[in-house]
Image: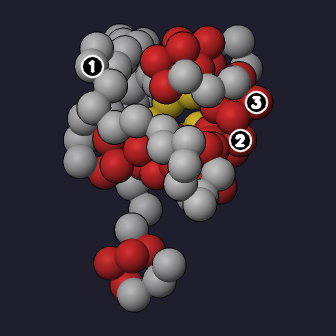
Amino acid sequence: MHASCRTLTFDSVEEKINPAAATYHYEQLAKIIESKIRTGSLAAGSRLPGELILSQEYGVGSNTVRRALDILRERGLIITVRARGSFVIEELPHDETDRGGK
């Protein structure tokens, strides 16, 4: 992380949580954020919006946001620093779907 990290906000939420979908809301949110990371919309070292902002922008509860961030941490896409926030890691791991996974 760099001292000059900036917090990104999603000025326009293009992808929405689908309440009728068979997947859990936290899985949908994790997929949306992962897509933003992998496409470069969220650059390496950038700070993600806080839980409150994400919950408001996507119309989900804070527990849903926490679970989505847990998934992203497990996938090695973000790190969370206590009292500072969650950040996109500097070097992304390979996408498992590129190797025939998931």
- CB atoms at circles 2 and 1 under 8 Å apart? no
Q: Which mark is residue 92?
A: none
Residue density around tag 2, few if under 14, some if 14–19, many if 20 or more, within 10 Å: some
- CB atoms at circles 3 and 1 under 8 Å apart? no
Secondary structure beneath dot 2 equals helix
Q: Quadrant of residue 79?
A: top right
Q: Which residue is mark 3?
A: 63
The residue drawn where x is 23% and y is 48% is: 39
Cα–Cα gap, marks 3 and 2: 6 Å
| Sooner in the amino-acid sequence: mark 3 or mark 1 | 1
Secondary structure beneath dot 1 equals loop
The answer to whether any part of residue 54 appears in the image is no
The residue drawn where x is 48% and y is 39% is: 17
- CB atoms at circles 3 and 2 under 8 Å apart? yes
Instruction: Work out whether 25 lies above or below 83.
Output: below
Secondary structure beneath dot 3 equals helix
Q: Quadrant of residue 9?
A: top left
Cα–Cα gap, marks 2 and 1: 22 Å
The residue drawn where x is 44% and y is 74% is: 96
Nearer to the camera, 96 or 82:
96
Instruction: Work out whether 96 lies above or below 21.
Output: below
Cα–Cα gap, marks 3 and 1: 22 Å
| Sooner in the amino-acid sequence: mark 2 or mark 1 | 1
Q: Which residue is mark 1?
A: 12
Instruction: Work out whether 38 lies above or below 55.
Output: below
Indicate the position of residue 84 as horizontal and vertical percent values.
62, 14
Q: Which residue is mark 2?
A: 67
Q: Quadrant of residue 55?
A: top right
Residue density around tag 3, few if under 14, some if 14–19, many if 20 or more, within 10 Å: few
Q: Amino acid at mark 1?
A: Ser
